[in-house]
Image (cartoon, helix red, strand yellow):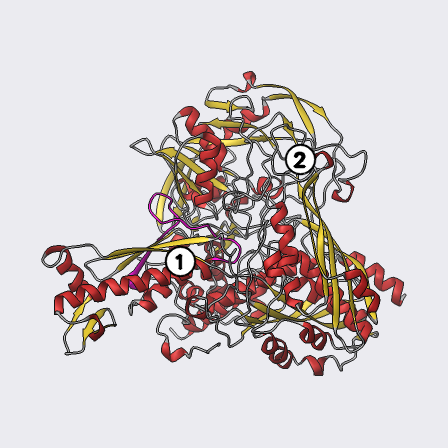
């Protein structure tokens, strides 16, 4: 069933081609949203709520209409259309619970007014002159108290739709059970029942949110925006304002899911529609930290049971997720915490997953790389590690014994989809055994665990942890990607894709796929991506879908282009297509004749059977083949401070064939770093009024150089038959393992189980004190 | 007020606002490679060289640079020919989104000028003020080691 493609058969795919946008990026060319200066553009600033929960009793902008202010818009001046900022497919699975501006504010940072002025100084001065009278309401700042009987209701607007039980602050609810967990647990020799917490991590992409809108010379409304979802943005802007527009995504300075939502776009569009002028809004770092999106913080109670021989019998994950002030991605992120974790352990007799996603008066949560899986996997993998240790089994052996294999399935694939039912799938590529066994060898796991863990003399402890993970490749039966290829008379091709390169390198790997099929090289493929007026539709960059879905669309378009080229050459040579083939930028005929792509298209333009060779293909997947990952962590703990250093972090991953091994490695390394940040450093601290104190890079600690030891990446020999050239996804899965691997390693070192991320040194220090004095 | 600054070997005599930061001045002049990412002098994306030393332009008054020489990322690739550092960054996949890269290039150029043969620890130490959210830093360290080697062998 699975064959391993040898490198010899591939010329472009599976080679480390340099990024097609790389030369511009390393030279600092003006390619990001804020780099575009439009003549006569207004600077847009947002007045934000200082209160976590309040009603705007009155708002007076008269004093703020100083010279140089073009307009100030309040909730009275913008369309009162309820929507969700989440950039997802349609119909949207997230509740409609948000207005562009509302009479009620629901977190510190919620938008109150839009100010457009000739420059930033004027806009900021005007902002201070707006008088707002608030009626302050009691707030829910701790999501674990969102469902208290006396908790204030955050969403009492009559227009809300799609939320599960807003009167009790429940945005979404989900539950499912296969078999009977209660009964199975009773039969188990060993059980665990523990509660785990993951935090509302910030994306902290280097480029803050930014957008520009303007009318082009023909009056077409155009939006340049740093978005992961240009086509969804266009659809949602149309819903809000009732106007068609063109959305262009330039280069993006990182997104990680944070840009899978509308942030700035409605504000600039409102200003352009009001004034007719170009409008630009670039969020400050503080705004990006406090008023965009975070990861959904989650609490999971895990109950799991196994037999003495290590057979896992039952798992239950019961959760509570904090969606903050608005329910962006509320249901779908929560479901992924189960649907992209539990199928990994498909041999259990019973499995149960469920819980509530609640509103609170905190920054709205949204999509964030991993999309719930890092939260679910921290709980699940930690619990399985605890269970293995209770049984007295090596955690690698225990996890491997119970995990999924090629040719197998899990009923969860069908039961749990993206906010609805999923699709059945048989796993056609799964090299988790190689990942675990070969990874353990490279990491020297079995030698390392023989070493003593604690050096009491120097007060240093070492520990070794392992974590297993899976993810998906796309949202099956929903995600669609399109690709257009056009041949030019200079022998190059234009590849037009809706796919959204947010720094991942998707433009490059899509060009590689096209070049491979067309027997050409990447320098002959000019990629234009993410322009809603020019490129075909693509769902956008999320759900680990681009390589798989957009990649398959490009492959299919390239194959169709190949047929078109052969057909044209067959007409020219008067030979059947079967006697022709492509070879190094030309068509070769069995009789020894050949014609270059350039010559062929030139003839087709001017002298022979005249036509433009151009094709468009779309791809929707019926399945979402999971990549698999086993990560090994070595930590060093200073027992006198509780400081944890990740000395070595080895990832052994099955992501199918890597289209570009260097870029794929970068995805895994980067995800590991973000996961290490989530596990150890990145912490949101709020004051008692709900204001985020950790609102910049000074106070919100993302890993810096030197905070991370060695991160290694190895690729399993794997081939996914449904993927383009055997590829699966690679971008998200790396974030699933650092949390549990590090927590497991800390336990291995000290016998102390940390069940809440981030693992703060102070907390670990106090635990060390308790245990070791 | 008026200041005289040499930017990437070109002399400017410019009017600036009181309190204007070098980051703002450079971007206004079209040096868009100088990136604004944090405003708190904590990320290194706005790094430029002043008289050959890496400095954060977001927290440097333009007035303080009067009479000095500024070099931005745009000054490090001659006529579009990439420097060894830029080449190595591409080869090692050390630029993902690319937003931190101009600051990294400018700082790494200063490092290699001071220390043509840095080891891994020296690279990490010198560049610790340059944050990157995409790469996990491994590829960037590899790139600078490679660039240093290429430069020594030039």
Tell me what residue is drawn at x 34 percent, y 63 percent. A514
Which mark is on residue B55? none
Chain hosting mark 1: A
For image coordinates 84% across by 61% down, the residue present is A767
Q: Which of the 4 quarters of the picture holds residue A248?
A: top left
Frontmost residue, A669 versus A733 = A733
Q: Secondary structure at mark 2?
A: loop
Q: What residue did someone put label 2 on? A: A107
Q: Is residue A579 visible in this depiction of the protein?
A: yes
Tell me which label, 1 or 2, sits earlier in the chain.
2
In the rendered image, the quadrant that contains the C terminus of chain B is: bottom left
Is residue A720 left or right of A96 when viewed as pictured?
Answer: left
Secondary element under disc 1, as helix, strand or loop, is helix
Viewer-side residue, A83 vs A13 = A83
In this view, the residue farthest toward the left is A607
Residue A667 pos. (x, y %): 52, 63
Tell me if residue A218 comes above or below residue A631 in the rendering: above
Q: Is residue A420 left or right of residue A465?
A: left
Relative image position of residue A612 (x, y in whole percent): 20, 54
- Residue segment shown in magenta: A523-545
Q: Is residue A524 left or right of residue A80?
A: left
Q: Position of residue A234 (x, y in %)?
A: 43, 40
Can see residue B51?
Answer: no
Q: Is residue B23 above or below residue A514?
A: above
Which residue is pictured at 15% across the width and 64% down the height?
A599
- Category of crowding for the residue at label 1, using alpha-carbon neighbours closer than 10 angstroms: few (below 14), some (14–19), many (at least 20): many
Mark 1 and mark 2: span between their CA atoms?
37 Å
Towards the viewer: A385 or A187: A187
Q: Is residue A624 left or right of residue A183?
A: left
- Label 1, on which residue? A507
Q: Could you tell me if the residues under marks 1 and 2 are in contact, i.e. CB atoms within 8 Å?
A: no
Against A363, is A745 above or below? below
């Amino acid at each position: 069933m699975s064959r391993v493609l040898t490198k010899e058969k591939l010329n472009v795919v599976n080679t480390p081609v340099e990024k097609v946008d790389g030369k511009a990026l390393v030279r600092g060319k003006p390619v990001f949203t804020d780099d575009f200066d439009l003549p006569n553009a207004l600077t847009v600033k947002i007045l934000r709520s200082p209160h976590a929960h309040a009603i705007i009793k009155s708002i007076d902008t008269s004093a703020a209409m100083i010279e140089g202010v073009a307009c100030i818009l309040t909730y009275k001046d913008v369309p009162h259309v309820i929507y969700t900022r989440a950039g997802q497919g349609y119909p949207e699975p997230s509740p409609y619970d948000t207005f562009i501006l509302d009479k009620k504010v629901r977190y510190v940072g919620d938008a109150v007014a839009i100010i457009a002025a000739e420059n930033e100084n004027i806009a900021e001065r005007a902002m201070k002159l707006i008088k707002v009278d608030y009626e302050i309401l009691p707030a829910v700042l701790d999501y674990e108290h969102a469902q208290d009987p006396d908790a204030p209701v955050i969403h009492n607007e009559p227009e809300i739709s799609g939320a599960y039980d807003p009167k009790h602050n429940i945005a979404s609810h989900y539950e499912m059970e296969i078999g009977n967990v209660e009964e199975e647990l009773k039969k188990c020799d060993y059980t665990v029942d523990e509660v785990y917490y993951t935090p509302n991590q910030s994306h902290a992409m280097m480029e803050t949110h930014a957008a520009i809108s303007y009318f082009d010379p023909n009056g077409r409304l155009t939006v340049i925006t740093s978005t992961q979802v240009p086509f969804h943005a266009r659809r949602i802007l149309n819903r809000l304002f009732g106007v068609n527009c063109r959305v262009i995504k330039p280069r993006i300075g990182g997104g990680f899911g944070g840009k899978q939502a509308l942030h700035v776009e409605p504000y600039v569009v409102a200003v352009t529609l009001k004034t007719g002028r170009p409008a630009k809004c670039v969020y400050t770092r503080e705004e990006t930290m406090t008023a965009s999106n975070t990861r959904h913080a989650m609490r999971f109670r895990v109950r799991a049971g196994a037999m003495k021989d290590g057979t896992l019998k039952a798992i239950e994950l019961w959760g509570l997720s904090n969606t903050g002030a608005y329910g962006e991605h509320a249901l779908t992120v929560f479901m992924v915490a189960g649907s992209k974790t539990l199928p990994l352990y498909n041999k259990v007799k019973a499995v149960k997953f469920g819980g509530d996603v609640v509103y609170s008066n905190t920054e709205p949560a949204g999509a964030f790389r991993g999309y719930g899986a890092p939260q679910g996997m921290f709980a699940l993998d930690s619990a399985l590690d605890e269970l293995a240790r209770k049984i007295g089994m090596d955690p690698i052996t225990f996890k491997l014994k119970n995990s999924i294999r090629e040719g197998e399935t899990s009923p969860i694939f069908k039961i749990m989809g993206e906010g609805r039912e999923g699709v059945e799938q048989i796993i056609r590529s799964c090299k988790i055994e190689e990942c675990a066994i070969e990874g353990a060898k490279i990491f020297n796991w079995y030698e390392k665990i023989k070493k003593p863990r604690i050096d009491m003399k120097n007060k240093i402890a070492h520990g070794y942890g392992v974590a297993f993970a899976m993810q998906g490749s796309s949202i099956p039966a929903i995600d669609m990607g399109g690709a257009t290829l056009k041949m030019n008379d200079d022998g190059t091709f234009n590849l037009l894709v809706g796919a959204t390169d947010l720094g991942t390198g998707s433009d490059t790997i899509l060009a590689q796929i096209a070049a491979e099929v067309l027997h050409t090289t990447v320098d002959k493929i000019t990629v234009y991506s993410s322009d809603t007026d020019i490129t075909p539709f693509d769902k956008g960059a999320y759900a680990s879908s681009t390589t798989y879905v957009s990649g398959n669309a490009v492959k299919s378009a390239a194959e169709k282009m190949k047929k078109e080229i052969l057909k044209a050459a067959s007409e020219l040579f008067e030979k059947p297509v079967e006697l022709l083939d492509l070879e190094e930028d030309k068509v070769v005929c069995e009789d020894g004749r050949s014609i270059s792509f350039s010559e062929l298209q030139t003839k087709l333009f001017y002298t022979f059977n005249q036509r433009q060779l151009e094709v468009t293909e779309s791809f929707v997947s019926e399945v979402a083949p999971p990549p698999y990952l086993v990560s090994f962590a070595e930590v060093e703990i200073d027992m006198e401070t509780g400081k944890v250093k990740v000395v070595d972090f080895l990832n052994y991953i099955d992501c199918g064939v890597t289209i570009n091994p260097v870029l794929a490695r970068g995805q895994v390394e980067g995800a590991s770093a973000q996961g290490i940040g989530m596990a150890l450093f990145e912490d949101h601290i709020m004051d008692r009024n709900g204001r985020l104190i950790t609102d910049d890079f000074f106070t919100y600690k993302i890993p810096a150089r030197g905070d991370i030891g060695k991160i290694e990446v190895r690729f399993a020999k794997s081939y996914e038959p449904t993927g383009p050239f055997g590829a699966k996804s690679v971008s998200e899965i790396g974030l699933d393992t650092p949390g549990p691997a590090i927590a497991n390693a800390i336990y291995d070192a000290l016998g102390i189980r940390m069940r809440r991320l981030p693992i703060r040194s102070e907390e670990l220090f106090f635990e060390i004190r308790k245990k070791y004095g | 007020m008026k200041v005289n600054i040499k930017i990437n070997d070109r002399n400017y005599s410019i009017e600036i606002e009181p309190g204007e930061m070098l980051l703002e001045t450079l971007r206004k002049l079209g040096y868009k490679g100088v990136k604004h990412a944090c405003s708190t002098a904590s990320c290194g994306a706005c790094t430029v060289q002043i008289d050959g030393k890496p400095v954060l332009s977001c927290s440097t008054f333009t007035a303080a640079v009067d009479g000095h020489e500024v070099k931005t990322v745009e000054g490090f690739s001659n006529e579009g020919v990439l420097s060894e550092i830029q080449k190595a960054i591409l080869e090692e996949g050390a630029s993902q989104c690319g937003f931190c890269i101009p600051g990294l290039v400018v700082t790494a150029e200063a490092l290699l000028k001071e220390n043509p043969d840095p080891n891994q620890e020296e690279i990490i130490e010198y560049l610790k003020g340059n944050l990157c959210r995409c790469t996990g830093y491994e590829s960037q360290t590899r790139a600078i080691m490679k660039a240093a080697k290429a430069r020594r062998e030039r």
